[in-house]
Amino acid sequence: MHLEIPQATSTDSSGTVTPISQHSVVLPSMSTHDTASLKSKDTQSLSTTLAAQPTAAKAALRRPDGNSLAFNKFILYENRLKFFVVASNTSDSRHRIIKIDRTSQDELTVVEDEAVYSGKQMSAMLKMLEDGNKGCGGLGRARVFFGVAAGFIKFTAGWYMILIAKRSVVALLGGHYVYHCESTDVMPVAFSHKIDKPAEEQRLMNVFKQVDMTKNFYFSYTYDLTSTLQHNLTRSGLAPCRQWNLNDRFAWNHHLLTTAFDKNSVPSAKSHWLVPLIHGHVDQAKLTVLGRVVFVTLIARRSRHHAGARYLKRGANDEGNVANEVETEQIVSETLTTPFYFPAPKDTPDGKPSRRPSPNYTSYVQYRGSIPVFWTQEVTSMVPKPPIEIPVMDPFYTAAARHFDDLFKRYGCPIMILNLIKKREPQPRESKLLEEYTQCVRYLNQFLPRENKMIYRAWDMARAYKEKTQDVISYLEDSAEESIQMTGFFHTGPEPFSHFLQNEDDTMSVQNGICRTNCVDCLDRTNAAQFVFGKRALGHQLYALGVVDTPNLAFDSDAVNMLTEMYHDHGDSLALQYTGSALVNRVETYRRMPHWNSHSRDIIENLRRFYANSLLDADKQTAINLFLGVPAEKTTTRTPPQRGNYQKWFKDEHLEIAYPLDDCEKALAQYVNTRGDYWIEYYRPLLFTSLGKHFAFSMNSTLKLPGCVYIILGLSITLA
């Protein structure tokens, strides 16, 4: 990677931001001489090479963090030689510009201007670029888009750029909008895109497009969707092994964001114009309780590791990554204020205005993933349920050890394992995995310290439902309460004063540990169990916010009915991604309250699942592998992972408290005083907005208010 930085200029006298630096990103195969030949007239006179700069100068010219800027609108100009991308913020008051070379299809050259321009400066810049590029077509027609979604991809010849063409708002967290990708465009970078093997290029393009980026892909310009709310707000107070800026495990376009750039370049995931995408499910709804408005948000993040179709991705791989791995976060917040903070009291010690964390945000995280041992199901025979095989017997459970060590690193202790597979069957199938999984946890637990041992609960949920020997929901509620008491949940402030009189606890709370739920597919039974856990957590979250006077919620209440529908949509989305069909057994099934058409619907979903698994999964797996950059097994050069210690299979630092309360309190206070600027995307006081079109007003709710309300310059006017 070769970096180029032009000299600083200070010719602007308007009092606005002045361009100061610029850097060029070129693939390693391009030499310095070739790069210089690609420069246009508008940048050539300003450029000097980084190699000629002293070390101190290199350090001074590093990319700024840019936390106070958010660009969510992009305009693309193109001619025969270059793409010009202008990034703008919500109020069109700050802009940046990116240049992409189009003269070579083998190398990708991106020049990103580090300067932030005002509106007048950007207009002057575009006028200069128009005049300087008249010989090759000027700037061309402007085209609006909303981010480079997947980054760049190359098949047999030439690079392509994937753009977000349409988006829709699906959630609002602390003033940060979360968007769903509605439409994408794939554009060749080179103007003369010559293809030597057109048939193979078209085949790979068709395979790539089988991953439908218009379904269940989400992004945000100002909020890190790849991490939990607790991690985002308390990151600076965590141990170094947990202080990631972007959890690339859940960034599904990570390969496409990084494959075109050298590892030593500026991290592309931090760029304002490259958008990390999560794959999974996002839903948000409003709960109204006696005039108090509570937002319930459900975020499911699917891992990009060992991802794929149902029968082709089972169990764990050598690195300890499991199939159908999904992190589900349930955020419950009261919207008294938009951001994550409150104004601080006037009598601050230093007399300066500051902020204090808003105590109105809570979060609870769950986890699902396939059983972390080596097991497969062959789909060569046309049978609805292929037999389960355990091809590799690892007496030391190396893959499971890596898997649980990673869970300790991400979530801390304790880890509760809820295993819902069948115990007794006429023909042993799931029960094979029960024995292997039980032995695995028993083996790994014997080397853990007593206070860090994993809590293992194996329960045949299907048998309990069929034989009517147990109330399925009651058992799961007891397990949920046990788990929540062990791990806790995240709350950004103290509970109401009435709770303080009982509990004498006036601090925030954090979640340390996780409940890991699984069945065979991690779909029907797992989703029903996670709903019960979410329902129990919702009661505790509403109680912590002072909305209800007891954490026990009745099943037929508006809140639980709304949460049931949210988890149904959540489960259907995850099931469609993994198996090609919606859920078969829903929560009502295990509550013994099935709908009159549930039996016929279950038959249809089973047939759809069988058809998808038998005929479509191979092509689906090929598309996912191409999208994620997974090499073919025949061509992979990856070395096997290094064998760890058989007894000391964990790292001591991973067993330490993941989220120390005191450090998290300090980190949260630091966050709201330095990084809580929600208005950079949300607040638009000069825009005439109909609340009928405003997301926070029109989202799904337990209460629909009559009338039409408008906001004009921050003043609300209600029209009957």
Image (cartoon, rainbow, N blue to C red):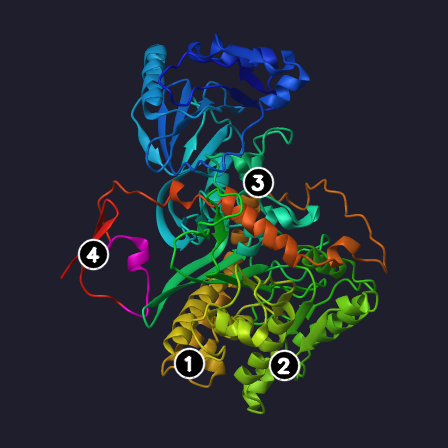
SS for callout 4 = strand
Q: Residue drawn 55% across and 51% down?
A: 233
Of callouts 3 and 2, which one flags the residue occurring earlier in the amino acid sequence?
A: 3
- Give the image location of residue 82, x and y in percent: 42, 20
Residue 137 horizontal side relative to residue 116, left or right: left
Q: How many labels does the image show?
A: 4
Q: Give the amino acid type for the residue marked by disc 1 in the picture.
A: His
Q: Residue drawn 65% across and 64% down?
A: 513
Marks 4/1: CA–CA distance: 44 Å
The image shows residue 144, relative to residue 685, as above or below, that is above
Of callouts 1 and 2, which one flags the residue occurring earlier in the amino acid sequence?
A: 2
Asked if the magenta segment contains residue 697, the reply would be yes
Q: Residue drawn 59% across and 81% down?
A: 478
Q: In which quarter of the image is the C terminus?
A: bottom left
Q: What stretch is highlighted in magenta?
A: 691-703
Q: Residue 709 carries which label?
A: 4
Q: Mark 1 against mark 3, which lies toward the viewer?
A: 3
Reading the image, the residue beneath label 2 is 460
Q: What main secondary structure does the magenta stretch of the protein show?
A: loop
- Give the image location of residue 339, x and y in percent: 42, 51
* Front residue of this view, candidates 539 and 669: 669
Q: Do the residues labelled 1 and 2 touch (CB within 8 Å)?
A: no
The image shows residue 503, relative to residue 373, as above or below, that is below
Q: Give the amino acid type for the residue marked by disc 3 in the picture.
A: His
